[in-house]
Amino acid sequence: MLRTLPLVVASLLAAPALGQVIEVSEPIIRSQGWSTMAGLTVGEARTVVTGQAAFPGISVGVLRGVHSRVDVGGRLSFNYGVEGNAADIAPELKLQAHVRASLYQGQRVNLGAEFAPGALVTFRPADEKTWGMTVPVALTLGIPVGSALHLHAAVECPLWFDFSSAHVRVPILAGGGAEYFLDRSLALTLNLRMGPTLQTWAGTGVFTFQSLLGVAWRL
């Protein structure tokens, strides 16, 4: 009995310390586990409604998680800056499909890709209309900062074709943004992009940018 007493005492003293080690080793919760901008998806069988406004216009969209790593949906935009061109101010209507894929999901970073092909029409003076097609692709690196904030950096090429003039424009944009989660289902969003748009027929470029505030609501 006397020989086993020290072992019993040592076990009792070690138990609290062991409990503390287990508690510290638990994973830290980062963001809310979903995103409409970074490298996470909205979640399988979940639906998110989005809205954005500022420059170049306003948009509403919907995303549906068809897989834990894939979202599909659509977006309708009404712009007053044609494809983000600050020097080309005219009403523009655009309807796009929207596909998002999560390529990598980690505790500290995540990586995603987006594809949003669609049709657009620009209304110019004297009833002149410009018909076109946009084929944007993007790569996004997400950085969850905490349970309420998710940052991201992105490179994007929203290539678009002007059928009326047979011109091709190649925007090369970079930027970032943030999602601030008010709760598990509602987030405020900020999306910033800027860079040149190469005009292939002229061999020149024009400055293009996007600056959009929005909201994302997961149903």
Image: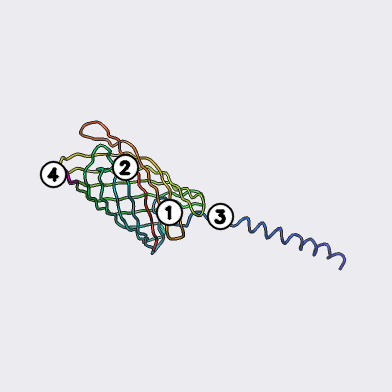
Instruction: Find the distance from the CA under tag 4 to the CA under tag 2.
Output: 27 Å
Task: Point out the tag, 3 or 2, that comes first from the N-terminus.
Answer: 3
Q: Residue 215 versus residue 35: which sits nearer the camera?
A: 215
Instruction: Find the distance from the CA under tag 3 to the CA under tag 4.
Output: 56 Å
Q: Which residue is mark 3?
A: 28
Q: Residues within 10 Å of mark 2 (few under 14, many from 20)?
A: some
Q: Which residue is mark 2?
A: 157
Q: Which residue is mark 1?
A: 40
- Of the residues shown, which amino acid type is indicated by label 2? Cys
Q: Is residue 115 left or right of residue 148?
A: left
User: Does residue 180 sit above or below 166 in this rendering?
Assistant: below
| Secondary structure character of the magenta stretch overall | strand
What x and y, as percent, mark residue 66?
36, 61
What x and y, as percent, mark residue 184?
46, 60
SS for dot 1 = loop
What x and y, as percent, mark residue 41?
40, 56
- Of the residues shown, which amino acid type is indicated by label 3? Ile
Task: Point out the tag, 3 or 4, that comes first from the N-terminus.
Answer: 3
Q: Which mark is residue 148?
A: none
Q: Which mark is residue 128?
A: 4
Task: Point out the tag, 1 or 3, that comes first from the N-terminus.
Answer: 3
What x and y, as percent, mark residue 100?
36, 53
Task: Point out the tag, 4 or 2, that comes first from the N-terminus.
Answer: 4
Which of discs 3 and 4 lies nearer the camera? The answer is 4
Marks 3/2 in contact by CB < 8 Å: the verdict is no
Marks 4/2 in contact by CB < 8 Å: the verdict is no
Q: How many marks?
A: 4
